[in-house]
Amino acid sequence: MLVNDVMTADVECARPNDTIAAAAARMRDLDVGALPVCGANERLVGMITDRDITIRATARCCDPAHTKVSEVMTHDISYCYEDEEVSQAAWQMMEERVRRLPVLSRDKQLVGVVSLGDLAVDGDQQLAGQALEAISEQPH
């Protein structure tokens, strides 16, 4: 089974110059905890999570109406390709200890996000369970 068989498509992006208040409002409206951050031509440049906003902005007393997504987003993120096997994406989640991966086309445009939930609902439940266990383990 391929990643594009289980991923969530039609993912909305935040933009680097959006405010974190706007990003948080979009997360609320979409009922998600993370948004990919896209630059020109829908190229992935990072990820902004509710945790990024809390830890990197709120804890530093940043003004949400003036703090840009680019100031608090995670820049160095992992991703997978839509034509990869689901098992490869799950392995990558385990290795990197992440619960979701942006999904790119081979021309590097964002086409979706694959999460542990996607693996559990539409993919291999046993594999999703193994990935969750590995991600949740405390590092040694």
Image (spheres, helix red, strand yellow):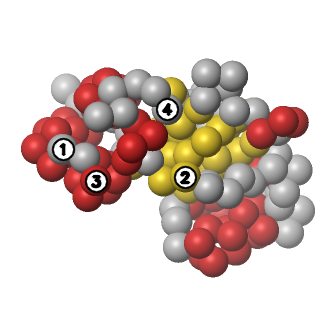
- The number of discs equals 4
Location of residue 30 in the rendering, given as x and y in whole percent from the top left corner = 59, 72
Disc 1 marks a residue whose amino acid type is Asp
Disc 3 versus disc 1: distance between alpha carbons?
7 Å
Q: Amino acid at mark 2?
A: Ala
Do residues under tags 4 and 3 come within 8 Å of each other at their CB atoms?
Answer: no
Q: Position of residue 80 (x, y in %)?
A: 48, 28
Residue shown at 71% from the left, 45% from the top? 37
Residue 122: assigned label: 3
Q: Amino acid at mark 3?
A: Asp
Q: Badge 2: how crowded within 10 Å, few (<14), some, or many (20+)?
A: some
| Left or right, residue 139 beside residue 101 | left
The answer to whether residue 123 is seen in the rendering is yes
Q: Amino acid at mark 4?
A: Glu
Of the two numbered discs 1 and 4 on the same chain, state the one appearing first in sequence. 4
**In the image, residue 83 above or below residue 39:** above
Residue 71 visible in this rendered orientation of the protein: no
Residue 9: mark: 2
